[in-house]
Image (cartoon, rainbow, N blue to C red):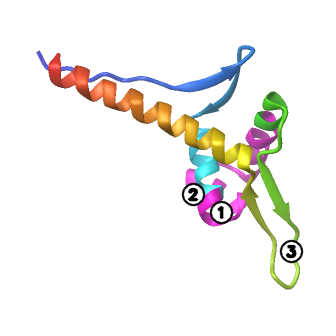
Amino acid sequence: MEYHIKFKLWIEKDGDIIIGLGRDKLLGEIEKTGSISKAAKNVGMSYKKAWSFLKTMENRLGVKLIKTRRGGKKGGGTELTEDAKKLLAEFEKISTAFENLKEQLEKNG
């Protein structure tokens, strides 16, 4: 019998979602592009929704996840804080573990 296992993964705090696959991708794109607007576009969400996700995550965790620089001669930009990098790394570690388990179960199933 052939089948495929599907799962959705997210991390919660006090019953509220902090990070899931969409927010993970958003943080990863911010890290790559240095821009919230470029990151939002790359993951297929509006700038407004991206800001909403970022502020919600920060409020739920009680830490800053991004540092922004206003435009000027060097231009503006956004970078992840150390807390955001830790959150992203932890989520990706958990996601990889789940993906590996899924593949193992499908292979042995």
> In the picture, which quadrant includes the N terminus?
top left
Q: Secondary structure at mark 1?
A: helix
Q: Which residue type does callout 1 highlight?
A: Lys
Q: Residues within 10 Å of mark 1 (few under 14, many from 20)?
A: some
The x, y position of residue 21, in whole percent, is 54, 36
Q: Where on the picture, by quarter, is residue 109?
A: top left
Asked if labels 2 and 3 touch by Cβ distance under 8 angstroms, the answer is: no
Q: Is residue 31 left or right of residue 75?
A: left
Q: Amino acid at mark 2?
A: Asn
Q: Position of residue 17 (x, y in %)?
A: 68, 24
The magenta-colored residue range is 31-56
Q: Is 46 included in the stretch rendered in magenta? A: yes
Q: Earlier in the sequence, mark 3 or mark 1?
A: 1
- Please name which of the two marks, 3 or 1, marks the residue nearer to the observer: 3
**In the rendered image of this protein, does residue 46 appear above or below residue 38?**
above
Q: Which residue is mark 3?
A: 71
In the image, 66 versus 35, the foreground residue is 66
* Alpha carbons under labels 3 and 2: distance apart: 21 Å
Say which residue label 2 marks.
42
